[in-house]
Structure formats: structure tokens, C-alpha cells
Image (cartoon, rainbow, N blue to C red):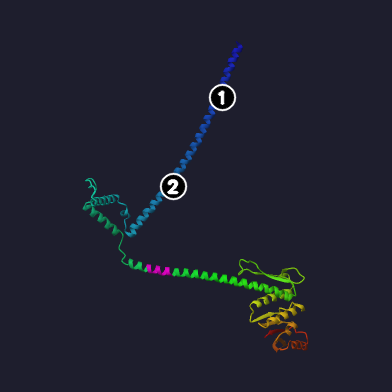
């Protein structure tokens, strides 16, 4: 009996524990549902608050707009003496007019007669409508008798401005076409001239330096009219490099080569060279003078120099000397035989005074 009683108590206890667990689970589910409902309630309250705020803002906006409308109505009524309420759509009058037109159309087409209950326009209604229309016309204000004349003037002014605008547009288009043609022609001529000068520069460089090679290149071939030109030179026995790395005499020879290369394409009536041979050695001066003899047939050269060999090649010699302190004197001499220049210079002491500067003018 004791064992049976223990079993019964054990079964009841397990059943009670199961019931307690079930109740706890149900309670947890209800608490979760309550939490979800509270969350939803808070969200709805927040949404309600936002809607109320939006409604309040809309009401304020509506009040502001209505105030603006009232102000505009008062402004029009006060300044133009027009009652805008008169222009409000009159639905009753519209229906009456529409009914009368339908009735008239049915009579003309032989349709069914209008019933007695249909609305009709009697003379009294017509008089009322005419009175309302006249009131509308009066509210429109006085007629501007000069409107036609003003319109004609404005139309004439508009036509004049339109013609001017068309003329400016056409002129602008023509100018752009001319500019494009000039740019195209200039680009073509420049490319052709640059190609000739480039070939001449290579030949002249080799002649002046007795060998080596040099070249001209555009910094931007896509824009030859606005880009710069790079000069690269390789004197005999040296590497190809920029002219900034050459010696003073070599740079002078490169400049002379470029000048004569341009003169081979289009010579100038005269040319002024200021001590271009100052940094040249004897060999370079001899080659420079030899090349110079080729170009004096087509151009006059004014050369400022201290070099005897260059002076010896001149046709006319001008010198500035200072026999007295502070007093300069210009001395000129026409040389027909180049050897005579050497003799005259040697008879004057051989060495040039530091205060003298000679100008050789080649005239052929």
C-alpha cells in the first residue's frame, strides 16, 4: 500500500509539474503577445502624433494660402475695382444656356419637343444674363483706344529686333566659318613650312658643324599652332641632347642653322646679328662665314661683331670709337676688297680697343 501511495503521489507531482510548465509557457506566450501589442500601440501612437503634426502644418499652410488669396482679392478690388466673385463660375446660368441651346437644336432638327418640365430661358432670364455680361464688361475697366497703335509699334520693334538677331546670328556663323577656314589654312601652311624648315635645318646643321645631326619636333602635334618647338642636336662626337646642354658656341651655331633654314624657305630683306660669333671658335667662324656668303646674295646682313674674320667679309664697315673721353665718334669705311679690311685692321695696331664696337653691313 505504501508503494502504491508513493506511486500515486509521484504521478500527481509529475502531472502538477507538467501543468505548471504548461501554464508557464502560456504565461510567457501571453507576455510576448502583450509586449508586441504594446510595441504596436506605441508605433500607432507615434504615427498618430506625426499625422496630427502634419495636419496642424497643413492647416497652418491652408490658413496662410487663404490669407494670401484674401490679400490678392482685396488688392485687385482696391486697385482695379474688380470684384473677382463676379467671375466665379455660375453653374445655374450655364445649365440654362445649355438647355436653351439643346432645345433650339431639337427644334431645328425636328426632334422630339421639349417637355414642359424642361428649364427654359424666358426674356426675363435673358435680360438678367445680358445685365450680368454688361457688368462683367464694366468690371474689365476702360477700353485702351491706343492698344492697336501700341501693338503695331511693338510688332514693328519686334520685327526690327528679330531682323537684327538674325543678322547677328548669320554674321557669327560666317565669322566662325572664316575663322575655321583660316585656322585650317594656317595649320596646313604651317605644317608644310615646318616640314621644309625641318629638312633645311638638318642640312644646315651638318654643314655648319661638319657632321652630326639635329632635328625639330613639335611639343603637341595635335595643336601645332599653339605648341612650342623642341630642338635636339648632336654635334660630331657627342650624344643627342637638348640645346640647353650645349656650349655657348654650339648654341650659337644651332641658332644660326635654324635662322638660315628659315631663310631658305622665305628670306628676309635684311637681318641683324648681334655678336652671334662671340662664342665661336676659329673653325666654326670659318664655316659660319662660308654659309653667310651664300645668303648675302638675297638678303642684307647687319652684323655687330668684334671678330676680325667676320669683319674681313664685310662690304661696309662702321665703327664707334672714343678718341676723347666721353665723346663718341662714328667712323665709316667702304670695303670693296675683303683683304683690304685685314690690312687696315692690322695697320691700326691689330688689337681692338675695348671701347670700340664694329658693325659689318653686307650689301650685295
Q: Are marks 2 and 1 in contact (CB under 8 Å)?
A: no
Q: Which element is circle 1 on?
A: helix
Tell me the quarter of the image containing the C terminus: bottom right
Image vertical order of residue 48 relative to residue 234, above or below: above
**Residue 57: numbered disc:** 2
Give the structural element (helix, strand or loop) at label 2: helix
Q: Nearer the viewer, residue 83 or 25?
A: 25
Q: Quadrant of residue 363?
A: bottom right
* Front one among 322 and 356: 356
Q: Which residue is mark 1?
A: 21
Q: Is residue 56 left or right of residue 94?
A: right
Q: Is residue 284 visible?
A: yes
In the rendered structure, the answer to whether residue 1 lies left or right of residue 47 reads: right
- Foreground mark, 2 or 1, reads 1
Residue 130 in percent (x, y) is at 25, 56
Query: Residue 349: horizontal and vertical position, in percent?
Result: 78, 87
Q: Residue furthest top?
A: 1
Q: Earlier in the sequence, mark 2 or mark 1?
A: 1
**Looking at the rendered structure, which numbered label has been put on residue 117?**
none
Membership of 120 in magenta stretch? no
Q: Residue at x 70, y 82 (%)?
A: 293
Question: Going 37% across and 53% down the picture, which residue do you hit?
Answer: 69
Q: Residue at x 66, y 77 (%)?
A: 264
Mark 1 crowdedness (10 Å alpha carbons): few <14, some 14-19, many ≥20: few
Mark yes or no: residue 281 visible.
no
The secondary structure that dominates the magenta segment is: helix
Give the residues drawn in magenta, as a range.
154-163
Q: Is residue 247 above or below residue 16?
A: below
Say how many tags the image has.
2
Mark 2 to mark 1 CA distance (whole Å): 54 Å
Amino acid at each position: 500500500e505504501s508503494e502504491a501511495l508513493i506511486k500515486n503521489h509521484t504521478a500527481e507531482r509529475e502531472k502538477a509539474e507538467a501543468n505548471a510548465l504548461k501554464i508557464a509557457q502560456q504565461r510567457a506566450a501571453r507576455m510576448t503577445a502583450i509586449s508586441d501589442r504594446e510595441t504596436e500601440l506605441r508605433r500607432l501612437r507615434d504615427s498618430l502624433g506625426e499625422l496630427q503634426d502634419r495636419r496642424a502644418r497643413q492647416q497652418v499652410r491652408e490658413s496662410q494660402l487663404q490669407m494670401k488669396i484674401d490679400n490678392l482679392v482685396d488688392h485687385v478690388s482696391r486697385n482695379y475695382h474688380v470684384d473677382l466673385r463676379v467671375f466665379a463660375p455660375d453653374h445655374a446660368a450655364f445649365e440654362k444656356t445649355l438647355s436653351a441651346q439643346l432645345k433650339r437644336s431639337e427644334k431645328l432638327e425636328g426632334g422630339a419637343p421639349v417637355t414642359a418640365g424642361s428649364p427654359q430661358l424666358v426674356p426675363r432670364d435673358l435680360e438678367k444674363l445680358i445685365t450680368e455680361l454688361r457688368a462683367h464688361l464694366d468690371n474689365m475697366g476702360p477700353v485702351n483706344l491706343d492698344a492697336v497703335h501700341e501693338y503695331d509699334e511693338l510688332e514693328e520693334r519686334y520685327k526690327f529686333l528679330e531682323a537684327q538677331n538674325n543678322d547677328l546670328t548669320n554674321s557669327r556663323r560666317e565669322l566662325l566659318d572664316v575663322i575655321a577656314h583660316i585656322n585650317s589654312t594656317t595649320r596646313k601652311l604651317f605644317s608644310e613650312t615646318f616640314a621644309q624648315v625641318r629638312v633645311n635645318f638638318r642640312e644646315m646643321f651638318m654643314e655648319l658643324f661638319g657632321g652630326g645631326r639635329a632635328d625639330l619636333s613639335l611639343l603637341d602635334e595635335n595643336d601645332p599652332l599653339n605648341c612650342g618647338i623642341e630642338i635636339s642636336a648632336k654635334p660630331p662626337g657627342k650624344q643627342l641632347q637638348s640645346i640647353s646642354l650645349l656650349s655657348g658656341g654650339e648654341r650659337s651655331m644651332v641658332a644660326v642653322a635654324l635662322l638660315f633654314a628659315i631663310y631658305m624657305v622665305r628670306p628676309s630683306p635684311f637681318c641683324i646679328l648681334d655678336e652671334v660669333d662671340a662664342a665661336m671658335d676659329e673653325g666654326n667662324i670659318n664655316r659660319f662665314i662660308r654659309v653667310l656668303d651664300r645668303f648675302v646674295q638675297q638678303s642684307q646682313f647687319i652684323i655687330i661683331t668684334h671678330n676680325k674674320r667676320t669683319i674681313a667679309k664685310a662690304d661696309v664697315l662702321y665703327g664707334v670709337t672714343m678718341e676723347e673721353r666721353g665723346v663718341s665718334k662714328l667712323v665709316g669705311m667702304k670695303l670693296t676688297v675683303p683683304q683690304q679690311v685685314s690690312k687696315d685692321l692690322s695697320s691700326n695696331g691689330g688689337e681692338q680697343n675695348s671701347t670700340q664696337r664694329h658693325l659689318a653691313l653686307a650689301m650685295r
